[in-house]
Amino acid sequence: MDAMSLRTKLADMSVMKKLFTAAEQEASRAGDGPPAAEHLLLAALALPDDSGRRALSEFDRTADDVRTAIGEVHAEALRYVGVEAGPDGRLDTGTPAAPPSGPYRSTGSLQVAFQRAVELSKRDGSSGIRAAHVVAAVAEPEHGTTARALDRLGIDRAALVEAASTALDEPR
């Protein structure tokens, strides 16, 4: 292994830690269970690397807009099964979610999205995973919470993937 690939792997590990920690915090803040792809998207938008935010800004949207849309999608899903949630999509249980402990847990959607982000970073020859890789990866699936939230915001997923690709081509 050469020094460049070692640096990339170390940088990826640092990004992974930031992403997974922030995704867990987003899920906890929303009162959700294990973090899912939508929480990974919010985590990517909070990274110091602004490529994900730049991609989203092409649609005049912010991370707060995405967070609000995700809450609305969650509330709508709960209403569908007869449960009324607050306007932010949270259930009012009266008790905060317990802080996570033990090994990292996540949903399959987060795992698939992260693996896809890794594939995208390798395919484009980047020197590691960047926020826009995650944005593109979570925007690709046509079903799920993230797809519904992006639809609610009027964001075409294919156009967001393209905007993410463009953001990766721009200097950091």
Image: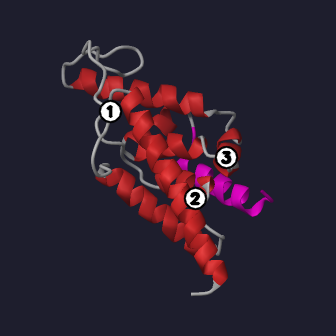
Secondary element under disc 2, as helix, strand or loop, is helix
For label 3, count other residues whose C-alpha is less than 10 Å away and answer few (under 14), some (14-19) or many (20+). few
Of the 4 image quadrants, the one containing the N terminus is: bottom right
Q: Can residue 156 be seen in this view?
A: no
Query: Residue most toward the front?
Result: 102
Q: In this view, does 158 lie above or below 96?
A: below
Label 3 sits on what residue type?
A: Pro
Q: Quadrant of residue 88?
A: top left
Q: Mark 2 or mark 1, which is nearer the start of the sequence?
A: 1
- Whether residue 158 is in magenta: the answer is yes
Of the 4 image quadrants, the one containing the C terminus is: bottom right
Which residue occupies the foreground of this view, 35 or 57? 35
**Residue 48's disc number:** 3
**Residue at 48% over, 41% down:** 22
Label 2 sits on what residue type?
A: His
Q: Mark 1 or mark 3, which is nearer the start of the sequence?
A: 3
Q: Is residue 51 visible?
A: yes
Task: Name the residue tied to disc 2.
Answer: 133
116 sits left or right of 15 in the view: left
Secondary element under disc 1, as helix, strand or loop, is loop
Label 1 sits on what residue type?
A: Pro
**Residue at 56% over, 35% down:** 154
